[in-house]
Image (cartoon, rainbow, N blue to C red):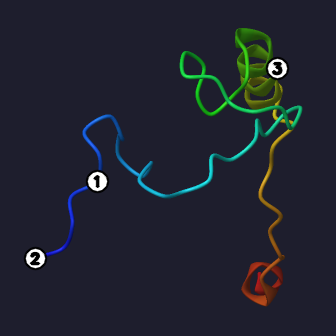
């Protein structure tokens, strides 16, 4: 039977290193996880709402066949 993680460890916290804030790189806080603050959370939300985040797509040859 595998050893149980400590009671205070949440999901994915047992023996893993916390990732830094994706916006500024500071350590993440509990209240704004995965961000360090509400400001960084709002910056990320603004980037999503203004379409700053995008997945690059390649044009298919089939689209030109018309």
The Cα atoms of the two marked residues, 3 and 1, are separated by 34 Å
Image mark for residue 5? 1
Q: Nearer the viewer, residue 16 or 62?
A: 16
**Residue under the point 83% across and 32% down:** 26
**Residue under the point 82% across and 20% down:** 43
Q: Nearer the viewer, residue 17 or 55?
A: 17
On the picture, is 62 further left or further right than 15? right
The image quarter containing residue 23 is top right
Q: Nearer the viewer, mark 3 or mark 1?
A: 1
Crowding at dot 3, Cα within 10 Å, few <14 / some 14-19 / many 20+, comes out as few
On the picture, is 2 further left or further right than 5? left
On the picture, is 5 further left or further right than 28? left
Image mark for residue 1? 2
The Cα atoms of the two marked residues, 2 and 3, are separated by 44 Å
Going by the picture, which residue comes out furthest to the left? 1
Q: Earlier in the sequence, mark 3 or mark 1?
A: 1
């Amino acid at each position: 039977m595998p050893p149980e993680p400590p009671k205070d460890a949440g999901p994915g916290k047992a023996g893993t290193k916390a990732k830094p804030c994706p916006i500024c790189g500071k350590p993440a806080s509990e209240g704004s996880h995965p961000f360090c603050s509400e400001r960084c959370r709002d910056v990320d939300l603004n980037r999503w709402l203004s379409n700053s985040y995008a997945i690059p797509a390649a044009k298919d040859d089939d689209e030109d066949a018309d």
